[in-house]
Amino acid sequence: MQRFETEIVIAGGGLAGIITAHELLHHGHRVLLIDNDTEANFGGLAKKSFGGVHLIGTPLQKRMGIQDSVDLALDDWLRCARFEEGDHWPRRWAEFYCNHSIEDIYQPLDERGVEFLPVVNWTERGFDRTHNSVPRWHIAWGTGYEIIEKCVAALENHPGRSRLELLFEHEVSGFEFEGSRVVGVYGKRMSDGAEFSVKAEHTVIASGGMCGGDLSKVRKHWYKDWGEPPEIILNGAHRYGDGLLHDAIEAKGGVVTHLDKQWHYAAGIHHPAKERPFDGLSLVPARSALWVNALGHRIGPRPMISYSDTRYLVEQVCRQPGQYSWQILNEKIAEKEIAVSGSDFMTAFRHKKKLKLVRDMLLGNKELIARLARECSDDFVMADSFDELVAKMNERSLFGLQIDRERLLKDLTAYDGMIERGPAFHNDEQLRWIAHFRNYRGDRLRTANFQKILDPKAGKLIAIREFILSRKSLGGIQTDLSSRVLREDGEPIPGLYAVGEAAGFGGGGIHGLGSLEGTFLGGCVLTGRVAGRSIGRL
């Protein structure tokens, strides 16, 4: 057996683990950071993300004339979260996030050289209740890949780098106890199963959530009000996010809570890489597309509209026949509005190509749409005529369901007819939302100007078959505001901390039922900073 000894051991090499390690080096500690994955994948799922961070009262907001405040942000958060009685720590963490997003998220990233795009994006605006009252989604120039690169560089260039040891391709599976205190971890080497153990004064769980490595846990903890989980769920989470350490600490009396509070997306398609079964790619769906169910019926009575309420969209798809959906649009809409929530496909953002980004914004991202059509043809179909489109959709229909041609044509014709009559007669909620989007300059260039779908001048027709895509665990290991893991009696387990998604991004469920978006990366930075400071002060 391999045996290690250090002051602090961190189980997990995602963004939260990296930030925690940096903070601990700052306080003069010796740190051993262990990760299941290879060194090339250091940074976890954050490295593959679009790189959006939820921030409040930033210089970028002020430059755009966006009037934000901690009080407004917290009101929005609480409306979105809908905390229940007993959600003491999740609510405390939500308050802490809103009060400390500048000094504990924005400034640390800024100091590491992370540059945000000058236009703040406006996501999760809400339907019946306002979520984000103002734009707060700050996109890192270079995507999540850049955030990780800058944070790893800060770690590698730290004056105390000699006190840090990195151990890749090792799985932590449990905790060593002496009485009630955690004194280290144990696990196995991924290559050959050889066992190892680590003795440490303090242990930090940074192992991520439980939505990616094992979809059976997603199904087991499925939110009951949504009914039975879909037969097909795509996996958009980290492959090692299996909840192994959630189970291990719960077996030792630690509180693991709100596991049914999961963050999924309604517009997942099969990932062309096919690295694992049901590997998924998360689209940022088009706002001007008509969203229909597996029968070709427009989902309603409220239209499905992205950038509004992701949880609502997922809930509506789960109520439809077959529990999957289609978006109907054309090339002109697709090139202007579709994006992918990931760094690998958003090449202009990922590689900081300003001229390409401007060209794509003005002329449409033709390269992305061509790539999706080429590499994701099972879900992304194009046709020269409506009948050809329906035929291709039916070839891909599941569970014996077929497209109702006449109903789909009627819905599309009615929608296009309303656009044809002009804005004064736009008595459709989706068109009112489009007008709302185009009023904000951050969305105007990325939202079509009331574009008809069956317009022969708008290129080929497109149908995108979309599934529920599992992404994040909103619940997790309960922690106090020092990131200490709590027992059922409310007391901390000595020597044990949790950060990032493993801790439900703080308190075992900082988001409640829903996220304002960008709070995932932000929560990783915030909880990592808090844990590092808490241990550093001891």
Image (cartoon, rainbow, N blue to C red):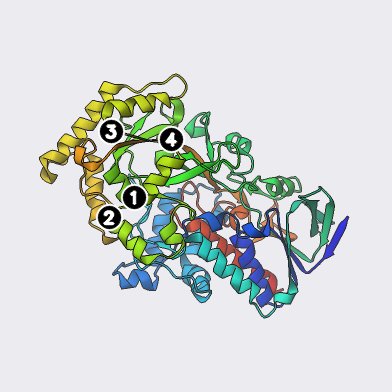
Q: Quadrant of the C terminus?
A: bottom right
Instruction: Look at the numbered discs 3 and 1 and tell me whether their residues touch, using CB distance below 8 Å.
Output: no
Q: Is residue 350 above or below residue 83?
A: below
Q: SS of the residue at dot 3?
A: loop
State the CA–CA distance, disc 2 to disc 1. Answer: 8 Å
- What residue type is disc 3 on? Asp
| Residue neighbourhood size for the residue with mark 3, other residues' Cα within 10 Å, grouped as few (<14), some (14–19), many (≥20) | few
For mark 3, what is the residue?
Answer: 384
Q: Is residue 67 above or below residue 246?
A: below
State the CA–CA distance, disc 3 to disc 1. Answer: 17 Å
State the CA–CA distance, disc 1 to disc 4. Answer: 18 Å
- The earlier-in-sequence mark between 2 and 3 is 2
- What residue type is disc 4 on? Asp
Taking the image as shown, residue 28 lies to the left or right of residue 43, namely right
For mark 1, what is the residue?
Answer: 366
Q: SS of the residue at dot 2?
A: helix
Give the number of marks.
Answer: 4
For mark 4, what is the residue?
Answer: 379
Taking the image as shown, residue 526 lies to the left or right of residue 348, namely right
For mark 2, what is the residue?
Answer: 363
State the CA–CA distance, disc 2 to disc 4. Answer: 25 Å
- The earlier-in-sequence mark between 1 and 4 is 1
Q: Quadrant of the N terminus?
A: bottom right
Of tags 1 and 4, the one toward the viewer is 1
Residue 149 is situated, as x and y percent measured from the top left of the image, at: 56, 66
Q: SS of the residue at dot 4?
A: loop
